[in-house]
Image: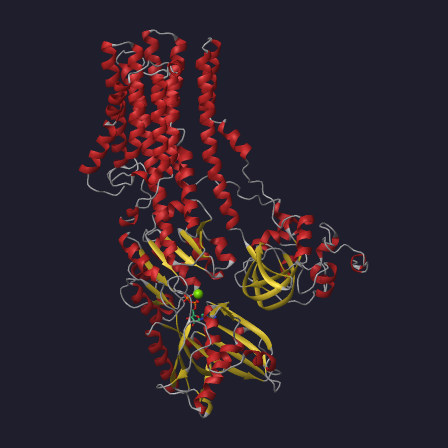
Amino acid sequence: MSRSTVTQDPAIDMSTSPVKPGTNLSKAWHALSIVQVSDCLASSSKGLTREVAAARLTSDGPNALTDGSKVSALHLVITQFKSVIIWILIAASVVSATLGEWVDAAAILAIVVLNAGIGFYQEYSAERSIAALKTMTAPHAKVRRDGAVRTIVASEIVVGDVLILDAGDLVAADARLFEANALTCGESALTGESEVSAKQCSALVRANTPLGDRSNMVFMGTSVTAGTGQAMVVATAMDTEIGRIAGLITDAGRDAGTPLQRKLDRLGYLLIWATLAIVALLFGLVLWRGTKVLDLFLTSVSLAVAAMPEGLPAVVTVALAVGVMRMSRHRALVRRLPAVETLGSTTVICTDKTGTLTVGEMTVRALFVAGQTFEVAGQGYGPAGKISIDSKPPSRQQATALLVLASIHLGCNDAHLVEDKGVWTTVGDPTEGALLSAGGKAGADRVLLDKECPKERAFPFDSDRKRSSVVRRMPGGGLRVLSNGAPEALLLRCDRILSYAGVRRLTEQDRTQVLDWIATLSAQALRVLGSAYRDLDDTTISVTTADAAERDMVFVGLSGMYDPPRPEAKEAIVTCRRAGIRVVMITGDHPRTAAAIAHELGIVSDGSPITGTRLDAMSDEDLHRRAATAGVYARVTAAHKLRIVRALKSDRAVVAMTGDGVNDAPAIKGADVGIAMGRTGTEVAKQAADIIITDDDFATIVHAVKEGRGVFDNIRKTLQYLLAGNTGELLVMTVAIGVGLPAPLLPIHLLWINLVTDGLPALCLAADPIDPDVMGRPPRPAGERITNRRFVETMLLTGVLTGGVAVAVFVYVLKSGTLEAARTYAFSVLVFAELLRSFGARSASRSILKVPFLGNLPLVGVVALGVLAQVFIQEIPMLAQVMKVAVVPLRDLLVLLAIGSIPLIALEVAKLVRSPAPC
Ligand code: ADP
Ligand code: MG
């Protein structure tokens, strides 16, 4: 392997990747030193400039595994012509044409095109909004560009980029590590190995080291399970290790639809066959009586077309897409469509505390050191605020002890505070930001600290260990471990304590005193952190693991920080209670802090919080019993979350579970609805989730549930409207022909009805605004059929009445007038009845007067247009001729409109008489 050709030619074009995919060079990066690697790739540890990155992106293409699952517009157009109905209609048009019925043929064709157009528009806009969402939830990665860390879409990564890796990140390309702090990766996606692999950065000797042992490399598609690191990208897209086998892994592609879509598909088929059977029966009956076969054929075809619920699957797609769009406007991004349906039936929401139920802005209010507790003044992360004890400033002795605590706050800290127009915010973890601010108030200086005691190593925070540590080199040459973390556990790792007299052995009495203070501060809803340090002689003790470093420590003190509950979370919890949804808080924080915040927010729980330790001691049956009423879990790890989800699910609850960390992924996946936090969430959590909440706010989750319920309502009401219409149409024809009358509707009428009263109003109903009281009723029982008893009753009532009024009008006019007039009147009354009924269909329980009429303007427009069109074809002789209707006096039209409102009125009366049962 030679790199001379690449690096020694000064004229080389640096803007494109020097290493072309497929060369041997791309195989043994692990055997090269990092200097060789960066030379080869014309990059450095500072990363690429934006111009170079942009040029490489153009020449190499995006960093994405190719998948052919894109839906093109053309494809959708073709899909429209895959439907049997369209071909039946086209056949009908051809038959008409051969008979010389040119007007008929043209009208049918026009209707075919219009129908296909509506279908295409529905699906195209639905697909588009779903595709837009996909890009919004695409994985991101942190890279160094122009020397600064930036978060970019993973597909924009190029060879030579420097990846910044943190626990919970997905590795976005194959890369060679040049920095690794306690870094481990989960590589089962690539190697099948379930154990995590530890990473380091020195070159490996053997060029043919197997993939699983290339400890200085990270690979696309794997995830960072712990630690931090930096690596230089050596391969992207199909050149990566996973890309090589991607030919074998075809993306699941377009899914087979959501459960509801599948159910409705099945229902649709059933109805299609039922319709065909009825039509065939009619056909036989009339044939037996003896009529012109061709006329009969056209009538049968048209009836089948009108009565078939071909719009069913589209209704679900549209309703889902509308729901998904509304949710994204309310900061909830849906990654998997079925989640929208499940959300609506959620009975338990398990939520994080910090940042979700609370604001996530922390301020240290109290410090405990050397047996005394100090008050800290000030708001937010700003530097202003004095430390006092009994309203007096600390003495010199006290100040010295506080300074030791402050040096740990600052020394073991990755956050930064930034000021903008007097407002201080934190970049990084809010907990650490609060420590920075408090440490500053106690007089510590970070710049000085970094200069005098350089950082040697870091063991970053993880939510199972619940602490973080940094190892620094002291001016005297020795090493010092500085740790902040959950105090009870940290205390167990200490054998000495700082007092005013210096460091001494930690006695039982000290331990009790510290634990008492933890309890006292926690009960004031403060999040309490402990701080400790340890001095090491670096030659005798190795501190390569967190476990080895964080032991035999000197306990220094406590910091109590306040993170106020979100006001909107409190409201959302009230909403949940009204909606029959239980809210369960799951936190890594102290049980007392958790209980205090839960109390402030009004989360109901019987008994005190269940801690992780108690969970471990519980059997599955015990947990199952307790989970039914427990509202707060504290000091839990990610593994506990999964157990809680399982316990709740075994109780037939529909569980939504939130999470942010890499370890939360199993619980997120295990829940019925997995929710990841958009701001604090790791890539791993996001990719495991069904829904991403971009503002981490609990209220957003509750809003998403509301949307989910709304989507289900809209699907149900649209279905109801469509099926009742189809019932009516079938009925008119069956009854009239059954009793020996001529067909009340001609083919062209049936097709017109199909177009004007089915397609467009259904589309508007599927996008109806949500009933504001949708959260005032209990969750829909899981597994409840959309077509429950009440649904069928209403459908039959309105369907039979719609058909009924049409038949009645037909018979009445036929007695005194011509067949053409009778047909015209029956046709009109049917169209009016259906269009008007659509207003009643907007709510299954609320009266039409209580649903804001103008709330669904498109529906008003579509109905108004439909009525107008119907009037026009009967008033303008030329149109009347095409549509084969008689010209009707305007006065009669008014009467017909009045008769047409009968099914709507009946529907409204039924709502009044019936118990106000849900939906
Ligand atoms: P939560 O459920 O409140 O989000 P976390 O998992 O974030 O809980 O934190 C659990 C505990 O870990 C906290 O109570 C605190 O004691 C400790 N902790 C949290 N963040 C840090 C940090 N950045 N450094 C050290 N310790 C931390
Ligand atoms: Mg947290």
Position above or below: 779 against 527: above
- Answer whether residue 57 is visible to the viewer in this image: yes
Quarter-of-image position of residue 306 = top left
Q: In x, y percent, where is residue 131?
A: 51, 43
Q: How is the image coloured?
A: secondary structure
Position above or below: 26 against 788: below
**Depth check, front residue: 152 or 738:** 152
Q: In x, y percent, where is residue 883?
A: 38, 16
Residue shown at 50% from the left, 59% from the top: 682
Which quadrant does the C terminus fall into?
Answer: top left
Which quadrant does the N terminus fall into?
Answer: bottom right
Q: In x, y percent, where is residue 102?
A: 47, 12
Residue shown at 48% from the left, 24% from the top: 113
Position above or below: 588 against 836: below
Position above or below: 490 against 350: below
Quadrant location of ligand 2? bottom left
